[in-house]
Amino acid sequence: MSVFSADYWQISPVDNALAPQIRQIIDGKIKPIGSLGVLEALALQLACIQSDEKQQTRQSKVVITSPTVLLFAADHGVAMHGVSIAPQQVTGFMTERFLEGSSAINCFCRANDVALRVIDAGLLHPISSDANIFFEQRIAAGTADFSVQAAMTQTQVTAAMAAGEAIAKQTISEGSNTLAFGEMGIGNTTSASTLLATLLGLNASEVAGLGTGISPEQLCKKTALIDKSLRRVQAGKGCPLLDAELALTEFGGFEIAQIVGAMLATAQMKKTIIVDGFIVGVAAMLASYIHPNVKDYMVFSHHSAEGAFPYLATALGATPLLDLGLRLGEGTGAVLAVPLLRSAASFYNDMAVLDPSVLT
């Protein structure tokens, strides 16, 4: 059975039968009803996910156990066109920094007690490392240039999805019930933008953004490249909207495909998914195209500064927890959201219940 079939994943929707009772618990805390705003909605979502998972009563506590970022790194053939502020070799350079513990994601993980796993999903040049956070799941030495041909073969995209599934299930089996997702890949904003365009029927100018800070000249080049890529596929397929499998095959990155598989596996195991910004958000959209129920398990961490993010958020019905102007990737926004999940769990579990006699 294909990994692009909903039947392969068999993801159950979150059972909201206990939601009224959970809402009653939240409303009964010693606070004005609704006064904790988005944290109340977050606590409700987490409690519903975990009550359904454990088949327990409304008295169950919400726990955030061993939250872990899965950071997938891969190279993109389209990067040869200079659509990023950095040359392609920076993908490997940054992956080495993740492994030595000196990047932004490492700092945020240490500050917030979040574990990190770094996955080589398809770097141009292999990395040799004995770090216990490093996992090699290489599909190939980067994708092909999707402006002239499909980024991946069908065999490669299937292998990438399966690899993402495997690392997510392994991480969950080792004790994590909350998986966050990050990415690293020079050129992957171009990939994600092209994917978004073909999934939503947008044109190149609507989805092309500044990424990590390209110049106006580079933006023009990026827009033209996305337009060329979309026209190549539309001319060949006769349809501007693609399904998830064809979209990933034509425009995806190995890291994006592995994230899609990992998200679906996480939802299949009824665990919480923390979605990072624009690129991981596009992976979330692809996952939802394969199985809509995956969205029940998603927490959207932050509003990305990438220009096309509002299209993505609207399509997913997402309400991001934070808006900090982030546009780095790596899973940084997802890690910064973890304290909010812990805070929602804490008030739900430990905040006192209001004695009605106090109000009389």
Image (cartoon, rainbow, N blue to C red):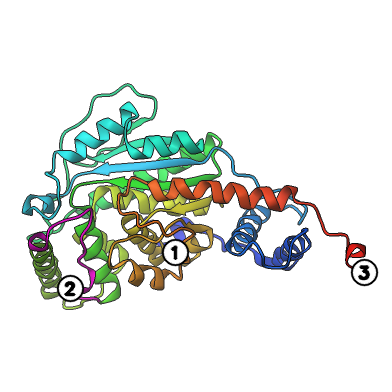
Q: Which mark is residue 360?
A: 3
Q: Quadrant of the N terminus?
A: bottom left
Q: Which residues are magenta?
A: 202-218
Give the tally of numbered discs: 3
Is 199 in front, or is 109?
A: 109
Q: Which residue: 20% across, 55% down?
A: 213
- Amino acid type at image mark 3: Thr
- Amino acid type at image mark 1: His
Q: Are marks 3 and 1 in contact (CB under 8 Å)?
A: no
Upstream in sequence: badge 1 or badge 2:
2
Q: Which residue: 40% across, 42% down?
A: 70
Q: Is residue 68 above or below residue 44?
A: above
Q: Residues within 10 Å of mark 1 (few under 14, many from 20)?
A: many
Mark-to-mark CA distance, 3 and 2? 61 Å
Q: Which residue is mark 2?
A: 205
* Whether residue 158 can be seen here: no
Q: Which residue: 19% across, 41% down?
A: 140
Mark-to-mark CA distance, 1 and 2? 29 Å
Q: Is residue 278 left or right of residue 155?
A: right
Whole-percent x, y for residue 337 in the image: 49, 50
Residue 360: within the magenta? Answer: no
Whole-percent x, y for residue 176 in the image: 54, 39
* Residue 235, image quadrant: bottom left
Mark-to-mark CA distance, 3 and 1? 50 Å
Q: Which residue is mark 1?
A: 291
**Which structural element holds mark 2?**
helix
- Amino acid type at image mark 2: Ser
Upstream in sequence: badge 3 or badge 2:
2
Whole-percent x, y for residue 336 in the image: 46, 47
Q: Is residue 67 above or below residue 1?
A: above
* Whether residue 257 can be seen here: yes
